[in-house]
Amino acid sequence: MLFAVICRDKPGALEIRKATREAHLAYIQQTGVVDIAGPLIEGGQMAGSLVILKTDSADQALAWTRDDPYAHAGLFQSVEVIEWKKVIG
């Protein structure tokens, strides 16, 4: 199953994102469940993340978000996990 993970950064948290980026990218490689991912951009600055996960359940997708180094660093104001269906691309 595919799940869209939509994360919004806390205001003023760009430095947390930058400082934790390498650990976040390593986590993505280590877990092997990320289909596609990238930052959300607002006003020319990174302000959140969109991650498409391939997991067996919403619970597994949610667990992945909780273990993300970005989450451990307190980067996110909100995290939403929604089942997603790929139609194009």
Image (cartoon, rainbow, N blue to C red):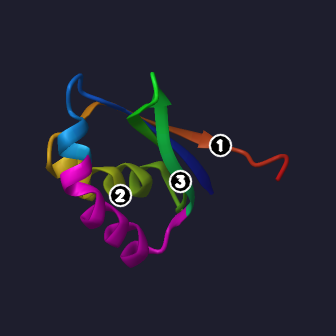
Residue 86 coordinates in the image, percent (x, y): 76, 49
Q: Dot 1, how many residues are within 10 Å of its Cα: few (below 14), some (14-19), or many (20+)?
A: some
From the top left corner, tell me how far across and down residue 68 is, in percent. Answer: 28, 56
Q: Which residue is mark 2?
A: 64
Who comes first in sequence, dot 3 or dot 1?
A: 3
Query: Which kind of residue does numbered mark 3 sit on?
Result: Ala
85 displayed left or right of 36: right
Q: Which contiguous range is marked in magenta?
A: 18-34
Q: Nearer the viewer, residue 53 or 75?
A: 75
- Residue under the image location 85 percent in, 48 percent down: 88
Instruction: Please say whether residue 51 is visible from this viewpoint.
Output: no
* Magenta span: chief secondary structure: helix
Task: Tell me, for residue 37, which label it has, or none.
Answer: 3
Q: Quadrant of residue 7?
A: top left
Cα distance in 3D space between marks 2 and 1: 16 Å
Per the image, is 20 magenta? yes
Specify whether 12 is left or right of 62: left
Q: Which mark is residue 84?
A: 1
Relative horizontal placement of residue 1, taking residue 72 as reference (left or right):
right
Q: Residue 24: x and y, percent?
A: 31, 61
Q: Secondary structure at mark 2?
A: helix
